[in-house]
Amino acid sequence: MTSPTGQPNEPFGRFDDVRPYLIWPGVLARAVRGERMGLALVELDSNTEVAEHTHPNEQVGFVLQGIFSFTIAGETRELHPGETYVIPASVPHSGRAGSGGAVVIDVFSPPRDDWERLERGDASKAAWP
């Protein structure tokens, strides 16, 4: 379902058929994309740290499951299911999943073309749904 060439996905699909990108140790992201935006379901193992980083993509999202402590431009908040975040392009951000791990939904504009260079995992290894 996910295009290895950066092309938009088919109109319909299932997340459990998407091979996850191995973003960092303990972080898997299954992504679908259109021409100008991408959506990712990101699963983080317990207590996984996401190092501070930036990217040229605007990012918005929400916590679907678990607790995720997010630092955006130096401000830290502990986010719970249903809570949202907005990260402007090129703004430093980092995070840490809680002791039970976390699942978040991220939307990127433009899509994360840089993920196409990452290793892909087995779709059956993803935990959600």
Image: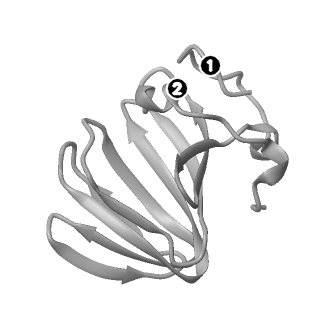
Q: Is residue 65 visible?
A: no
Please name the amino acid that badge 1 sits on: Pro
Using residue 69 as the reference point, say whether residue 127 is left or right of it.
right
Label 2 CA crowd tier, 10 Å (few <14, some 14–19, many 20+)? some
Q: Quadrant of the C terminus?
A: bottom right
> Is label 1 in contact with label 2 (beta carbons under 8 Å)?
yes
Residue at left offset 38%, top offset 53%: 60
User: Which residue corresponds to mark 1?
Assistant: 4
Please name the amino acid that badge 2 sits on: Glu
User: Which residue corresponds to mark 2?
Assistant: 116
* Residue 125 x, y percent position in the rendering: 80, 53
Comparing 33 with 75, the one in front is 75
Residue 3 higher or lower than 29, as above or below: above
* Residue 2 x, y percent position in the rendering: 67, 27
Q: Which mark is residue 82?
A: none
Please, which residue is most extreme toward the left here? 74
Q: How many marks?
A: 2
Label 1 CA crowd tier, 10 Å (few <14, some 14–19, many 20+)? few
Question: Judging from the image, what secondary structure is the residue with disc 1 in?
Answer: loop
Question: Judging from the image, what secondary structure is the residue with disc 2 in?
Answer: helix
Residue at left offset 51%, top offset 78%: 47
Residue at left offset 74%, top offset 44%: 15
Mark 1 and mark 2: Cα distance apart in space: 6 Å
Residue 66 higher or lower than 41, as above or below: below
Image quarter for residue 127?
Answer: bottom right
Please, which residue is most extreme toward the right here? 124
**Of callouts 1 and 2, the N-terminal one:** 1
Residue at left offset 59%, top offset 77%: 46
* Residue 123 x, y percent position in the rendering: 79, 43
